[in-house]
Amino acid sequence: MSEDVSKKNVKLARILLLVALGMFGFGYALVPLYDVLCEWKWLERDRPDAIKKAPEIGYTVDLNREVTVEFMTTLNESTPMVFRTEKKQLKVHPGEYYTVNFYAENKTDKAMVARAIASFSPAVISRYFEKIECFCFSEQTFKAKEAKTMPMRFVINPEIPEEYKTITLSYTFFDNTEKSVKN
Amino acid sequence: MSAVVVEHDHHADDHHDHGPAKGLLRWIITTNHKDIGTLYLLFALAMFFVGGSMAMVIRAELFEPGLQFVDPAFFNSMTTMHALVMVFGAVMPAFVGLANWQIPLMIGAADMALPRMNNMSFWMLVAGVLLLASTLFMEGGAPNGGWTLYPPLVLQPITVGKALPFAVFSVHLLGISSIMGAINIIATIFNMRAPAMKLMDMPLFVWTWLITAFLLIAVMPVFAGAVTMLLTDKFFHTSFFNAAGGGDPVLYEHIFWFFGHPEVYIMILPTFGVASTIIPVFARKPLFGYASMVWATASIAFLSFIVWAHHMFTVGMPIAGELYFMYATMLIAVPTGVKVFNWTATMWKGAMTFETPMLFSIAFVVLFTMGGFTGLMMAIAPADFQYHDTYFIVAHFHYTLVPASVFILMAAGYFWLPKWTGHMYNEKIGQLHFWLSTISVNILFFPQHFLGLAGMPRRIPDYAVQFADWNMISSIGGFIFGASQLLFLYIVIDTIKGGTGEKVSDEVWEEASKHSLEWTLPSPVPYHTWTTPPAIVPTEHVLDSH
């Protein structure tokens, strides 16, 4: 191989290596890009920071319709907690405000930081489900063996399309004591 | 009629190149493209049998309902490791091996552009695969969340014990190895071509590999990034995919498939290249539509970047997203259709003969098209909700990988082994291997379409009894297919050791030298070739576009 070609090869290899490194960075750039695409509603997601606290406004209560809301409580992996809801399901009228109590207990002898993440089924329902108060908005600190009763106040926007008769709201508690959480 | 041209004169004294170094060390320190090509091909063949054995475990367990041989966690490890070994250990390295052997020969270059890096990429591949294989012996077992390594499955300590960091570092090594290989291939094609060979004179195998190499450089780093995020989520308290910290597991799916879809074309584009090389030789016609083949390859590569979410239609996308990914995916059928049409048109009215490489190539055209059609079915977003994560997808991608990529790798072996070794393989055993493989591969994978449509989920060790019959048939096909591959192993060893004893001519196949440069060299190919580049290059294969 002549010296000339050798130099050309090394030069091209360097450029291509830079492209590869750039693509490694692009992989990371997809993380904020994903947030933007979700904001533009190109892609959808079900993330805790997307659940906003809504102010209490007086909707006209639609007494002709009844929607069944089911509540599920789950513990992630082996989170050492007790977590349950006072009601497994509730029949509600769109536009009317309701409060449901959830009960959580730290079973360990140490303080615990935990966070509940909400998830809806069907997923599109999240835009009609407005929460005025929820334990899921922020991290909860539990002292050793502490038990808490946590209210969740919500309303279903009367604009909810007719076809949704049953919606499921699931909460999962994550033990975040060891994780540094940025939110 | 046979296309084999047998010649009895000897070339042994025709050249005075110094040969390879003696001893075992030759294979470790070699920078010769033929040696490295051989290493890649033999390693890929070994991994084909390792991954194949894992598939045999899977089919044995699924032979009848209930749990017979392995526990569910190990079964899941087998599906995960089978995929990882076959994709990163067998199919990709096999094509890199072919590239190493063939690209310099086909473009009139003395060696690869960066021979030392070439050696390093091979040994990093070995290290990467060994690292992956070591997880099989670890506490908690090998990764078992599927080859896609989705969170939260792989992040849960119960499902993967100590394996995750090893799997992640293995992916890093495999990624670096393929990126170095790709850089080498691009540099070789751009800078080392014989001056007489213009880009649009290059054989299609070279073209498809050039485009594949760009795909590799573009997406392997993205995958490396995704698994690095998994690693930091698991051990360094980041929350890319951890919902509790504001992350989203669905994000991983998007990043993974941004890599994953081009990855499937990384495995199929060189397949197209080899098919486009073999079919014209046995049809005794120039390839139909050379330029359209090049453009079709480039368009498939481009489209592969913008269709990833068709792997995750059920994840909950807005309707506009579903529609976009549906139509964009269907668009791929156009360039792919051009290719299938061109192969068929190449055979049309050709003076065809049916030696083993041609048989495998024809089976590839037919069976790959079937795999393509089921792909179109799943591209229909509303229909995909039924097919998603069932045996239908398993049948689909196995049709596009086994009787396509793997068959074409077999075809390439039969096609070029005589050239590389100077010995003819045993045609009778070759044909037996072909017929056994083709019949059994359909017994193996065709029933999986029915299972999937009936709703059998993938990645399960046990199933409802209504799936029993087709599973048993599929397993029988699997066992026959697995056993048939031992014939290939026999043929490869036999051919290296002398084959039928006939001395093959330089051309090996009738008038092959009209199609591509390597057939103008002596058989077996000397250790050093094209130290002076050829003055003229064959243009038979590009006749249509000139």
Image (tube, rainbow, N blue to C red):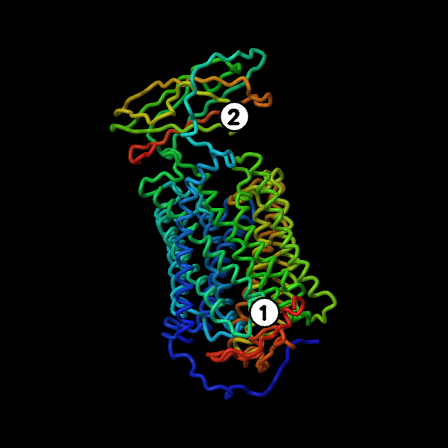
- Residue B26's place in the image compared with B244, above or below, is below
- The picture places residue B32, in percent across and down from the top left corner, at 43, 74
Which residue in the protein does label 2 denote?
A125
Q: Is residue B287 above or below residue B404?
A: below
| Mark 2 or 1, closer to the camera | 1
Q: Secondary structure at mark 2?
A: helix
Q: Contact, CB < 8 Å: mark 2 with mark 1?
A: no
Residue A4: x, y in percent? 41, 73
Query: B468 or B77, which is in the foreground?
Result: B77
Q: Chain of mark 1?
A: B
- What residue sits 50% from the left and 47% below the top? B68
Quadrant containing the C terminus of chain B is bottom right
Does B112 appear above or below B365?
A: below
Reading the image, the residue beneath label 1 is B201
Left/right of residue A173 with respect to residue B330 in the rendered view: left
- In the image shown, does B162 or B246 lie closer to the viewer? B246
For the residue labelled by badge 1, is the local secondary structure a helix, a strand or a loop? helix
Spatial CA span between label 2 and label 1: 58 Å
Q: Amino acid at mark 1?
A: Asp
Asked whether, in this view, residue B277 is left or right of residue A168, the answer is: right
Which quarter of the figure has residue B335? Answer: bottom right
